[in-house]
Image (spheres, rainbow, N blue to C red):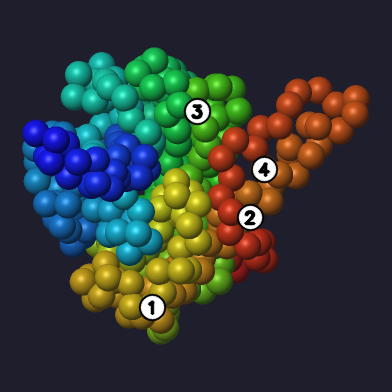
Amino acid sequence: MRFLLALLLCVPSLPAAAQTARPRTILFVGNSFTQGALSAIRRYRPDTVTDLTRSGQGGVPALFKVFAEQAKLAYAVSHATQGGQSLGFHYDQRRGLFDRAWDVVVLQEYSTLDADRPGDASAYTRDAVRLAQMFSRANPAVQVQLMATWSRADLTYRPGSPWSGKLVTAMANDLAAAARAIDAASPEIDGVIPVGEAWSRAIAQRVADSNPYDGIAFGQIDLWTHDQYHASVHGAYLEALVVFGKVTGVDPRTLGGQERAADDLGIAPAVAIALQRVAAEQLADQRASRSSVAVKAERPGSAGTSVAKNATPVPRSRSIQSPERRP
């Protein structure tokens, strides 16, 4: 017995970090824009993530998982999505699937904010806040992020929408402004993921074509898939890069031209690098903007406190310019 006890005492114990380390948990809640519908993203590596609706989809969450693995970050990735639905649908009908503690939650609203009243953020505000409050009750330290999505080409270049005849950047700007207003008003929400503004940046820099209805310019990509509504493989790849950079703080450019998902999906290395740069620049500009607001708020005699909750640490680059082409 004494011999066995001595052997046990000689076995080195694992470091405390190794004993307690666990993957960070992240949940995506959204619709077809998170699913990567109508592109190869939808069925991309579904075995690497947990689909809480059991529909066998990988989507943007699976891209996030691949990026995290390459950055040597441990994330357990889950998602609950339903095409054509709002955050209100998820709260009212699906919350039993995900009402528990998470480290990070990404919330993605319907593409026009409200299906019946495009551009009206009233329901978005109510539902994002009550979801964030629910997640905060389960884990007060949860990081809740709102994904602000992109301008729909079909609603810009065709008549009948509030964005018809405007610059292709207008819809993305409106969606981002709505998300920022909710973020500013809710202590349970920690930031906005500027996906739509990154799309606008890619268009402004002529990485991507601004109007899929008149053909795609040589050397540029199409961010929309065939319905001019959902994201193409390139568009979803940029979406996932922005989410990844915002949530983890890792510069998307560190993934490089040999990035695994790009290779799987047939994205040219030069295009992957360009999209990584666009994502990094958009996140850097967001951080710079939030830091500027925080400095103003902290000046003597100013009201309020800093609102720079979860800015992303990547280098700043030039600001976006509006594309020349109008609808």
Q: Give residue 257's mark.
A: 1
Q: Which residue is mark 4?
A: 290
x and y percentages locating residue 194 in the rendered image = 50, 48
Q: Secondary structure at mark 2?
A: helix
* Residue 274 in sight from this viewpoint: yes
Left or right: 55, with 128 as reference point = left
Q: Residues within 10 Å of mark 1 (few under 14, many from 20)?
A: some
Determine the residue positioned at 35% across, 18% down: 138
Q: Which residue is mark 2?
A: 285
Q: Amino acid at mark 3?
A: Ile
Q: Amino acid at mark 2?
A: Asp
Secondary element under disc 3, as helix, strand or loop, is loop
Left or right, 264 with respect to 294, comes to left
Which of the numbered marks, if any, corresponds to residue 189? Answer: 3
Q: Give the alpha-carbon distance from disc 1 to disc 3, as whole Å.
A: 33 Å
State the SS at label 4.
helix
Three-letter amino acid code at disc 1? Answer: Gly
**Residue located at (79% from left, 39% from top):** 295
Q: Position of residue 317 (x, y in %)?
A: 65, 65
Asked if residue 74 lies left or right of residue 323, the reply is: left
Question: How far across and how far down the image is residue 217, in percent?
Answer: 42, 79
* Mark before the other along the chain sequence, 3 or 2: 3
Mark closest to the chain's N terminus, 2 or 1: 1
